[in-house]
Image (cartoon, rainbow, N blue to C red):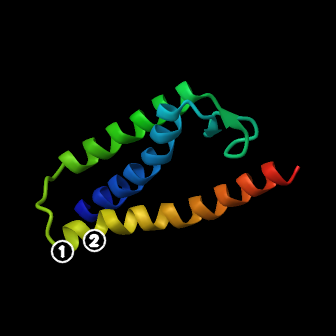
Amino acid sequence: MHYVATFFAGAFLCNCVPHLVAGIQGMPFPTPFAKPHGVGDSSALVNFLWGFFNLLIALYLFSLRPFALAFTPELIAPLAGALVIGVPMSVHFGKVWGDKHAQ
C-alpha cells in the first residue's frame, strides 16, 4: 500500500507544478473546473489554488510513510507516478496549446 500512496504522491506533485507556475505568472491554464474540462482556461488564481491543493495532497501522501531520497523502490514509486501523469498531460496540453494557436 505504501508504494500506491507514493505513486499517487508523485502524480499529484507533478500535477501541481504547471498550475502553480501558471498561477504565479498570472497566466490562464486549463483546470478540471474550466469548460470544457481540461481544455478551457481557468484564471491564474484558480490555477494557483488548484496547484496548491495538489501540493498539499502530495505532501500528505508522502507524510504517511516518510522515506529517504535514495534510489530505492520508495523513490521509484513517486517518480513513476510523476511519469505516468506527466507524459499524457504533456501530450494533451501540447495539443490544446497547438489548437488554440492554430485559430
Residue closer to the observer: 33 or 26: 26
Q: Residue at x 49, y 61 (%)?
A: 85
Residue closer to the observer: 63 or 13: 13
Q: Amino acid at mark 1?
A: Phe
Query: How many marks can you see?
Result: 2
Structural crowding at the residue carrying mark 2, measured as other residues with C-alpha within 10 Å and reported as few (<14), some (14–19) or many (≥20) = some
Residue closer to the observer: 93 or 66: 93
Q: Residue at x 14, y 70 (%)?
A: 70
Q: Residue at x 26, y 61 (%)?
A: 1
Q: Secondary structure at mark 2?
A: helix
Q: Residue furthest right?
A: 103
Q: Residue at x 28, y 58 (%)?
A: 6
Question: Would you say 42 lies left or right of 58 here?
Answer: right
Residue 50, percent from left and from top? 49, 34
Q: Secondary structure at mark 1?
A: loop
Per the rendering, the mark at residue 15 is none
Vertically, is 71 above or below 88? below
Residue 15, percent from left and from top? 46, 50
Mark 1 near mark 2, Cβ–Cβ under 8 Å?
Answer: yes
Q: Residue furthest left?
A: 68
Q: Which residue is mark 2?
A: 76
Q: Residue furthest top?
A: 45
Residue 93, percent from left and from top? 65, 55
Residue 38, percent from left and from top? 67, 46
Q: Which residue is mark 1?
A: 71
Q: CA distance from mark 1 to mark 2?
A: 7 Å
Structural crowding at the residue carrying mark 1, measured as other residues with C-alpha within 10 Å and reported as few (<14), some (14–19) or many (≥20) = few
Can you tell which quarter of the image residue 91 is in?
Answer: bottom right
Question: Would you say 53 lies left or right of 44 here?
Answer: left
The mark that comes first in sequence, 1 or 2, is 1
Q: Amino acid at mark 2?
A: Ile
